[in-house]
Amino acid sequence: MITLETVSKAIYQTIKKCTCCIPDDLSAAFDDAIQRENSELGKMALQKTQANFRFAKQNDYLACSDTGWPLFYYAIGDKVQLEGGLSGLEEISRKMVAQATKDGFMRATVKHPITGSDPGNNIGSNVPNFTYKHVPGESIQVTFVSKGGGSECFGGTRYQVIAFADGVHGIEKFIIDSYIEGARGGKICPPSIIGIGIGGTADISAKLAKQAAALRLVNSKHPEPEIAELEDRLYQAINMLGIGGGLGGRVSVLGVNIEYAYLHIGGIAVSMCASCVATRRATSIIHADNVVEEKASPTWFNGR
Amino acid sequence: MSEYHFKVPLKDEDIKRLRIGDMVYFSGEAWTSRSRVQKAVFDEGWKLPFPIEERNLLIHTGPVIKEENGEMKIISFAPTTSVRFEKWGPRSVREWHLKAIVGKATMGEKTRLAMKEHVCIHASPIGLTTNLFLDKLTIKNVYWKKEFGSIESAWIISLEDYGPLIVDIDCYGNNYFDEIEGVIQNNKKAAYQYLNIPDDFQYTRLS
């Protein structure tokens, strides 16, 4: 049985790792971007950002002040036994978010949408937010995403319904235009990772876009060649725009990740979600024997 | 592109030397605000509870503060997107007699014009520098913490050669991002071409 003590500690450590340590795949993408960037200001911005991330990792400081929306993605084994029952998982998660906020590993960022009252601990109605998957096995996989506010408020999630008559060109134009609009003046903190959700209902496409941006590794490819080709074409096209880190430059986007759902014959729902330059996620598996293991990737989408 | 090091209170002659693209460093006392302070003052009639005559540098930010043994320490500091404060931009420049706003990226047309009229600039960090300048920042005081919460309070912060920041709106009416925008719009045509999107492409109107 997984004990409350184990799960609490594992969730807390995952939150702390998420907000302080940029994932290894993003760090490698950064090193590569610094090599490729040919604008002097753009290179300087990337180098300073990388130095900032290194300091944060080495000293347990925040990678970015804005620890954004606290989002939990749980993959729950169908034979999991958790002390007190699985229904307690959200309460434990909320407590750990409050504790991490108190300890300075999250900024108290969320507030009431109408009254503006600040709970001071990032806990409120529908915050933090939870998404679940059921998987075989006896373990709990916890992924914590600290989704930056700039990339969420200004860049995404953007949504449009495109007529079949407008097809792939319509999708591509929507993405290019949305990214330019969102990145204007550096609002979404580029170079970002873009998630694109194609098909489904409005909420399905938006959910796929966010998960593609926040949960897939920056250099991952969709296994279907038509989708992978579209990812690559958009990656190349956006990197022609000269946005850079906002001040201009060659590296405007670090990755383009597409996920899709089958759609209704009425039209194509498309969503774009940007994940900022400080894309943060951390994953741990809590095994039945109370051993906790860190993972480099949530492998949320069938291995990617 | 030139580099300047200025002390608060900033003088008109300092600000007039700056052009978009220049690097600037600031020393002296500045104060912070996000939406809540601006809304309180400009929409709800609250009076700022501290003097600002000698503190004509405003930073748009919500710092992360840790209190240890009764001492407050900044543990994360990043100027935030300024355009969201555009509604109050012209009044903050005029009525708070600001000579510089440090934020992120740009502000809107009305603030750009107010900055031209009242000799003020906007400057932003280069890249994400949350942790890089912590040794240059000391907390002096905080106001409205109880009322608005830590992030939305007005913090008085002493700066020691805080920078480099890039001037993105100068006091001559220039906006660095307008120039970048021109380049991007031009490149957009090349991106469309790469994707084989026809020049005359128009969305089917669904509404």
Image: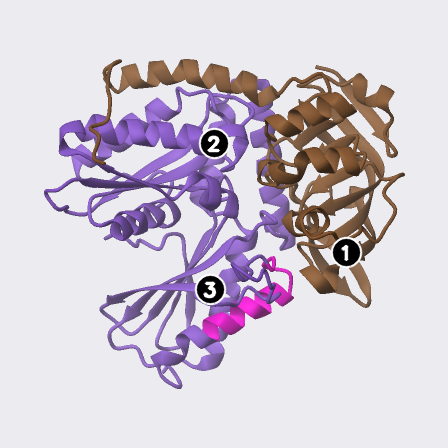
Chain colours: A purple, B brown
When asked about the image quadrant of residue A163, the answer is top left
In this view of the protein, which residue sits in the foreground, B88 or A27? B88
Coordinates of residue B77 in the picture (x, y in percent): 68, 46
Task: Please state the horizontal and vertical placement of residue B182, each as a whole percent of the image.
Answer: 49, 15
Residue at x 48% of width, y 15% of height: B183
State left or right for residue B140 relative to residue A178. right
**Image mark for residue A183:** 2
Which of the chains bears the disc numbered 3?
A
Query: Tag 1: residue type?
Result: Lys
Tell me the SS state at disc 3. loop
B2 displayed left or right of B9: left
Q: Residue A23 in the image: x percent, y percent?
A: 47, 48
Farthest bottom residue in view: A84
Please name the residue that numbered disc 3 is placed on.
Answer: A127
Indicate whether A296 appears above or below A38: below
Along the line of sight, the residue nearer the viewer: A292 or A82: A82
Kind of residue sitting beneath label 3: Val
User: Does the stretch in magenta take in A105?
Assistant: yes
Q: Amino acid at mark 2?
A: Ala
Image quadrant where residue A136 sits: bottom left
* Distance from the alpha carbon under mark 3 to that under mark 2: 26 Å
Tags 3 and 1 in contact by the CB under 8 Å rule? no
What is the C-alpha distance between the residues marked 3 and 1?
Answer: 27 Å
Question: Residue at the location (39% across, 19% down)?
Answer: A240
Task: Give, as a single range, the part of the protein colored magenta.
Answer: A92-108
CA separation in Å, label 2 and label 1 = 32 Å
* Mark 1 belongs to chain: B
Same-subunit check for callouts 3 and 1: no
Which x, y percent locates residue A278? 51, 43
Residue under numbered circle 1 = B73
